[in-house]
Amino acid sequence: MTGDHYFTAEPTATARPREVEFTVAGREYTLASAGGVFSADRLDPGTAVLLRKAELPGRDVSGPLLDLGCGFGPITCVLADSAPAATVWAVDVNQRARELTAANAARVGAAGRVRVAAPDDVPDGLTFAQIWSNPPIRIGKEGLHELLSRWLPRLAPDGVAWLVIARHLGGDSVHRWLAEQGWRVERHASQKGFRVLRVNR
């Protein structure tokens, strides 16, 4: 056993490479994964709900997109496929996750349109047309509020954020908190115990 979490910067868990297969919007994906990253053995159920129920960007979307907490990169790869004119920023504190996301972007032919970065390496002043996240609830309420308070203000004025949060892990309380912070929040969908939230200025 190790003390690693998926939000550990440099996981020490044995990598044990594997592949994860899933289908989104009619396209089949086979992505590389490894131990020490979030949901290493399968597409996380919350991520699956998010990608199924949120409105994927269209081919006309060109502004920068953000996958916040990218893990091994399933959201990044789907966004890069859906919006070939956009640049996708894949951000994660976990170095192994970033390496996997970069490799998976190459697998789907999107290496030139994906920027993989640690949080502090995202350029100041860069704003995003869309932010997508299955946020790391396990960091605790205070940590989650800090995370969202840091990144949601980087939405472009007409941008949209898509979040998925399990109801039993605080999906409704996060909805209320965001509204209290002045964001326009809509429960876009609910499925399998998850809330998909659409957030605008």
Image (cartoon, helix red, strand yellow):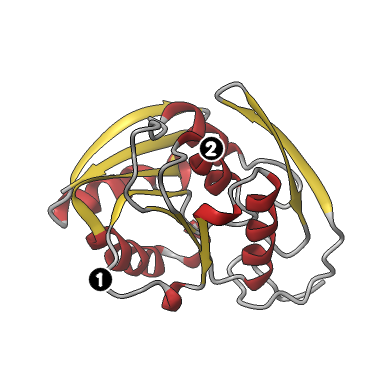
Disc on res. 81: 2
The alpha-carbon separation of the residues under discs 2 and 1 comes to 26 Å
Mark 1 = which residue? Answer: 125
Q: Position of residue 141 (x, y in %)?
A: 38, 63
Task: Locate residue 56 relative to residue 155 in the image: left or right.
Answer: right
Quadrant position of residue 103: bottom right
Q: Residue furthest left?
A: 182
Quadrant position of residue 30: top right
State the residue in front, 1 or 54. Answer: 54
Which residue is drawn at the image coordinates 40% and 32% (left, top)? 59
State the residue in front, 61 or 96. Answer: 61
Q: Secondary structure at mark 1?
A: loop
Q: Position of residue 163 (x, y in %)?
A: 39, 45
Task: Locate residue 98 relative to residue 61 in the image: left or right.
Answer: right
Which residue is drawn at the image coordinates 40% and 69% (left, top)? 143
Q: Position of residue 127 (x, y in %)?
A: 27, 60
Which residue is drawn at the image coordinates 47% and 40% (left, top)? 84
Q: Position of residue 48 (x, y in %)?
A: 57, 34
